[in-house]
Image: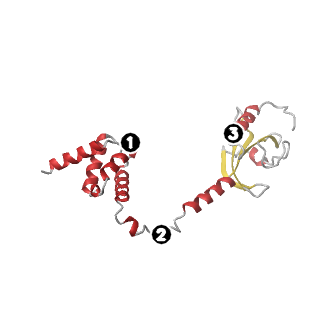
Amino acid sequence: MIPRQDFALDNYRAVADAIATLFFPHAEVVLHDLRTQKIDYIANNISKRCVGDDAALEDMLGEDVGERNIGPYEKLNWDGQKIRSVSTVLRDAQGGPVAVLCINLNISMFEAAKAALDLFLSSSKLIPQPDALFRDDWQERINTFLHNWLRQRQLGLNLLTREHKRELVLALHAEGAFKGKSAANYVANVLNMGRATVYKHLKELKEESV
């Protein structure tokens, strides 16, 4: 490694180390010194480049370079794996470009994970719900109605107030949900409320309809 004669970029080297440590082992951070047009520092080297290699970034010294962040963009690593990169132009106190910090993230692992998830979650091999199993599945009907009800009101199951739960019990009753055996107990468990409370709401509804 080339000895560090210039300490002006030390803070950026520390930032490079921090980013590479956080995303280890998938991220490489390369610091290019625009003044020398050399690679000044590499944290977690995955590109097999070396400190002191040509940076070849002469165009970044032009006065018309106004971009601060460039990317993200993709490139291919030496081993054929995809790299997603973003480069940041670092400037001195006078606003002149002095260095470029490049973060290179190996996304091959994430692509493989996405492909595995897509395969696992694919609906292409699913069949319609069998009538023999689901014709009288009151739990399935309760679940479907309950989550449609929540979605329409933009509510979360864990954030329901007491009044929300009462309203939902009454809506389920109107839907005929309590015709199933043990349906009241199931609804009580799902809504995290006592079965007695469910029966209380149903009793109040019955008295109101008299």
Q: Residue at x 28, y 42 (%)?
A: 163
Q: Earlier in the sequence, mark 1 or mark 3?
A: 3
User: In the orientation shown, which residue stands out farthest toward the left?
Assistant: 210
Q: Quadrant of residue 13?
A: top right
Q: Which mark is residue 102?
A: none
> Which one is earlier in the sequence, the residue at label 2 or at label 1?
2
Q: Position of residue 193 (x, y in %)?
A: 33, 42
Residue 19 numbered tag: 3
Res. 134 image quadrant = bottom left
| Horizontal side of residue 42 vs 129, given as left or right | right
3 vs 2, front mark: 2
**Which mark, by number, is residue 127?**
2
Whole-number angstrom distance, CA of label 3 to CA of label 2: 46 Å
Label 3: few (<14), some (14–19) or many (≥20) C-alpha neighbours in 10 Å: some
Mark 1 or 3, closer to the camera: 1
Which residue matches tag 1?
159
For the residue pair 8 and 139, the one nearer the viewer reads as 139
Residue visible at 30% across and 40% down in the picture: 162
Foreground: disc 2 or disc 1: 2
Residue 76 in which image quadrant = bottom right
